[in-house]
Amino acid sequence: MTNDFPGVVDAVWVSGHMAEDDLLLADVRGPNAHTRGHLPGSIPLVLGAPGQFTDRDVLEAFASEAALRLRRHGVTGEERLVLYDGGDCVSAASALLVAELAGHPRVAVLAGGLAGWEGELETGVVELDKSRTELRPRLDAVATREEIASRLDDPSLVLLDIRRDDEFSGKGGYPCDPRQGHIPGAKRLENIDLFSGPGRPKPADDVRAAVGAPEGASIVTYCHSGSRSGLAVIALRAAGYAARNYLGSWHEWSRHSELPMER
């Protein structure tokens, strides 16, 4: 079993490792799309999407359900799991968060997804073998409201706001949010600063220059509802950062009047 497993892989890497027994490719586009055409040997994998609230009981319930869904798809946690979508990595990034939250220890995303694959595709329905392996949910795979609130004065925390300038400044935003602004100490970036094209992170040096933090730094991302910030995690990990997503994001933070904000 190979220990050299990057968090983000490309089509060349996948092509060179496809024959290895412990590599499992998983298509997160849905079973119908998978049937019409998929990477050779891959399975369809539907894990569901987490909500925008990070209370411990909510996370525990969702993580347990996600672990059960992995088992139903035959995922044991012993394999190297590579997730892919149509190409923009938005769905793959969301599935990555869910798989890690469920307790899978080795998960990666295929940059560029199916759109970047130049090899042959397979078609048809793939039969799944259920697994009896018990995964242990890992709640620290995501950042929570409680954690961020307790670390606002922690210099080791790099907090990135992956939203538009009007959202960050508080001049714009979504009407469903009772407050507009940003979490104190956050630096604003957008995914255009991190990606050269759909699902394709910029070179690591460019990403690190945009972030302004040393390689290996611990980073937490957030946006409005966790989707843009989940995608940002892909580029940050490809650049060598230990990045996690605050999936509650501003949608959750703005609802707690006791929590500070800046405009």
Image (spheres, rainbow, N blue to C red):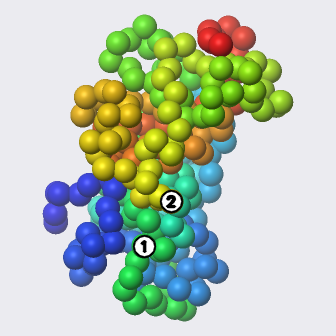
Above or below for 136 versus 79: above
SS at circle 1: helix
Which residue in the protein does label 1 denote? 116
Q: Where is residue 148 in the image (x, y as percent from the top left)?
A: 50, 19
Above or below for 46 versus 42: above
**Hey, what amino acid is under mark 1?**
Gly
Above or below for 16 versus 122: above
Q: Which residue is drawn at 45% across and 68% down?
A: 113
Front residue (pair 224, 187): 187
The CA span between labels 1 and 2 is: 10 Å
Front residue (pair 141, 36): 36
Q: Position of residue 77 (x, y in %)?
A: 35, 59
What is the quadrant of the C terminus in the image? top right
Q: In this view, does 215 lie to the left or right of 169?
A: left
Q: Is residue 88 left or right of residue 157?
A: right
Q: Which residue is drawn at 83% across and 30% down?
A: 175
Which residue in the protein does label 2 denote? 198
SS at circle 2: loop
Q: Position of residue 100 (x, y in %)?
A: 42, 48
**Hey, what amino acid is under mark 2?**
Pro
Residue 262: quarter of image: top right
